[in-house]
Image: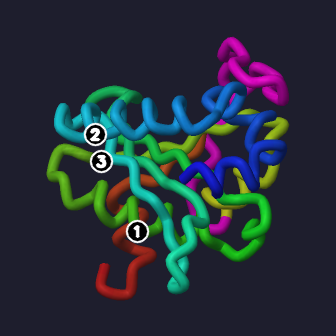
Amino acid sequence: MNEAVAASIEHLRPWMPWAQDANAGTNLDFLERTNEQWRAGMEFAYGVWDRGGTLVGSASLMDRVGPGSLEIGYWVRADRVREHIASRATAALVDVAFTFPAVEVVEIHHDRENEPSGGVPRSLGFERAGEFEKEPTAPGESGVFVRWLMRRDSWAARRPDG
């Protein structure tokens, strides 16, 4: 994780609050927090690895948007963008999210200025559900976030086995 974050720090800093002071110690803290959140059923963070064993990003399924919904977040290392890594990881997590009977909606939120992040929900057929204001927590953020939604029935209709 340290190598992947270090190799991508300038790419991540504008959008990821945790990247502002990322180092081996804060990365270890993140992993410990992730384990706690996993055990509590609040957040499920996954490393995304290529076949050669290189960490190419991360994707998380998070219980922070309200009842019946889960949110997905992701990042990809700088030298691997445009390989559809985030889209494939997100599609896998949407499949996982809808295995929970109570989940009817999956959401993705990103700062309006972070246009590449918007390509992921757009490519997967998410519905752009508007914008909302949120205090910026990273230097590239405008404070206006885009909200994308995927409903269970819409996802099922897109799947070959749906």
At x 56% / y 38%, what residue is drawn?
A: 24
Residue 86 sits in which quadrant?
A: bottom right
Which three-letter amino acid code belongs to the residue tagged 3?
Glu
The outermost residue toward the front is 24
Residue hosting label 1: 92
For the residues marked 1 and 3, what is the alpha-carbon distance in whole angstroms? 16 Å
Q: Secondary structure at mark 1?
A: helix
Residue hosting label 3: 104
Q: Position of residue 94 (x, y in %)?
A: 39, 60
What is the crowding at mark 3: few (fewer than 14 residues within 10 Å), some, or many (at least 20)?
Answer: some
49 left or right, relative to 14: left
What is the crowding at mark 1: few (fewer than 14 residues within 10 Å), some, or many (at least 20)?
Answer: few
- Vertically, is 27 above or below 76? above
116 left or right, relative to 95: right
61 left or right, relative to 19: left
Which three-letter amino acid code belongs to the residue tagged 2?
Asn
At x 52% / y 38%, what residue is drawn?
A: 27
Magenta-highlighted residues: 123-146
Disc 3 to disc 2: CB gap under 8 Å: no
